[in-house]
Every structure is written in C-alpha cells, then in structure tokens.
Amino acid sequence: MKVNANTLFKKAYGNFCVPAINISNPEQVTALFSAAQKYQAPFIVQTSPAAREYISAKMILSYIETASSNYPDVVYAVHLDHGNESHVHDAIVSGQYTSVMIDASHDSLEQNIARTKKVVQQAHPKNISVEAELGVLSGVEDDLEVDEKNALFTNPNDVVTFVKETNCDSLAVAVGTSHGAYKFSGGQGIRFDLLAEIQSNLPNFPIVLHGASQIDPEEIKRINSAGGNILNSAKGITDDEIKKAIELGVCKLNIATDLRLLWTRVFREYFRDHSGEWDHLIPGIKYMDELEKLIHKKFKLLNCVNKNHLFK
C-alpha cells in the first residue's frame, strides 16, 4: 500500500522511525520490498536525481511499481530525495511519488523559504508531502559536494519561522552528520544539544536525519582486503546515537552509503575469488540476500518491525 509520507510520520513519532532507503538498481528494490513484507515494516523508498539519470526515472519507478505488485503487503511511500524545482515538478506530474524534497539549503534563509513555499503550494493539492532542509550537511550526496568548512549547522532559532512560513511537512536538519563514508571527521558526532533544542521548538514535528548510514568497519576491512582503498577513518552513526535521535523527534532516517558499501564488498570479493568468472548475476543474487539481512537489521534498530497493522 503506497501512502503519503505524513501518514507514516503520524504513527511513527515517539514510537518508531521510518527508514528511507535510497535505491538505484533492481537488486536494491527487490531486497527492500522482500524484507519489508517479511518483517511487516513500513518504509520510504527514495530516488535521488543522480539515480533517476543513471537508469531513467521511468525505469526506476517501474521497478518500484512492479515490486509493490510482487509484495502486496508492504506499506511504503515513494520519495524524491534532494531535488531542485525541475526534479520536483517532474516527480509531481508523474503521479508516482507521494513525497518530494526540495533542497534549497545552500540558499539564504529567505530564499530557502521562498523556494520551499512554492513547492509546497504545488505538491499539497496533489496529496504529496514536502520535505525541506535547513542547514547544510558536509560530504557527498551523489553529484552534490559540500566542503566540511562550509557545512552549516541548523539554527534552532530559525526552525519555527521556517516551518510556519513554508508549511512543509518534515524538516531535514544539519546536526553533525554528513553524506558519504566519512561522517564524523574529528570525532565530533551528532550535536544532540542542537537536536534537542530543535525538538523543543518544534514539538511533534517530523525531523529527518540525512547521512545516517552506520559504516560497518568490518565491511571497510573486507573491501580493502579485496583490493579497495577506503580509509579506515570512515565512520558512521552508532546504534545508541540513532536511538537517541529517535527520542528527539527524528522520524525519517536516510540510508544510502551502507547499501553501496555492501555492493562493493560483495562484488569485489566474488571476482577476487572467482577471477575467471564474468557473470554479474551470481554476485547479484548474493548481494540481494545479504542486503535483505542488512535491511532487516535497520528495521529492528528503528523499531519498525511489525508496524504495518497500524496503517490498515
């Protein structure tokens, strides 16, 4: 059952967190929907502009539509991640998305409000929820790069005005996480003081945490043993940090890097150990199996297992 993201957030707040999984190939779509049906866990499947360009928006959306038919007991929203006005317009008119994100976080507060408000006015009449971002994350999000020194934390004093002026449905905040595999350079971690102040200023309002992969050090070690060269300083978010963030109003947790690291490890190890092989289907099957297990772990951590009954 495809729903508006707001429907998920209303049940999730204070109860569980909705995993928002970035997908870019059919293996990821299959593993996600299979795990969600098996464990009765609601989720958000999201596509970035880069993923839509990689395989075409029509193709990637058809994967999602087919998966929903193959796994009819799932509860999910379809979300456009990190879109500009052009991406958002295409998503709205497609009729396939139930949620969109307008990323105007690099603009001034006034410009961000103006751009977000315009998207809300386009999306809400179509029953499409809108995620906005206030503050700038460092790291890499597909083709978007932000230097660490230019990263800006979300100002808790701005959030009430921003939400009131834009009428957005959820807010992605910059509280110390970053995109990619190097999330906490310097070891600063999440600024829970900022997150707590944001929640205090916006009680019961859905907060989104981007850059929320966990970066399993064992995956990094295995990738490097199979010929990779990822720095051992790569670090993600811990279980305890995620649980504390959920207590402070985080209803949506974006996950992308962990899926990519798993793909890299599975394929590197397979072709290292089977140097005469060339068929990608064999490691592809292994990737789907291991990805389903990884997603199950995410579901359990976010306390969203066996929550589908809340939406029926």
Image (cartoon, rainbow, N blue to C red):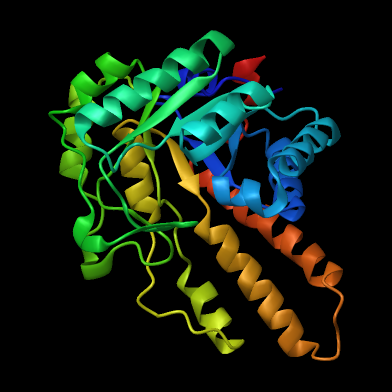
Q: Look at the image and tell me whether residue 155 can be seen.
A: yes
Residue at position x 57%, y 88% from top? 225
Placement of 241 over or under 253, stated as above or below: below
Q: In which quarter of the image is residue 162?
A: top left
Task: Decide if residue 273 is on the left or right side of residue 147.
Answer: right
Q: Does 35 appear above or below 265?
A: above
Report the quarter where the N terminus lies: top right
Q: In this view, does 30 lie to the left or right of 12?
A: right
Using the image as rendered, state which of residue 234 and residue 166 is in the foreground. Answer: 166
- Furthest residue toward front: 86
Residue at horizontal 26%, vertical 68%?
A: 185
Would residue 23 be visible to someone looking at this image? no
Residue 183 vs 308, above or below: the answer is below
Please tell me how many numbered marks the rendered image carries.
0
In the picture, measured across the screen, residue 233 lies left or right of residue 67, that is left
Which residue extends farthest left? 157
> Between residues 202 and 160, which one lies in front from this camera angle?
160
Q: Residue at x 82, y 36 (%)?
A: 66
Percent of width and height locating residue 142: 50, 56
Q: Quadrant of the C terminus?
A: top right
Q: Measured from the top left, where is residue 12 in percent x and y?
A: 47, 25
Residue at the far top: name it: 125
Q: In which quarter of the image is residue 38?
A: top right
The quadrant in which residue 278 appears is bottom right
Relative horizontal placement of residue 125, taking residue 293 as reference (left or right): left
Provide residue 273's location: percent of width, then percent of height.
Answer: 75, 88
Front residue (pair 106, 229): 106
Residue 233 on image: x %, y %: 35, 76
Q: Which residue is drawn at 74% across and 80% down?
A: 270
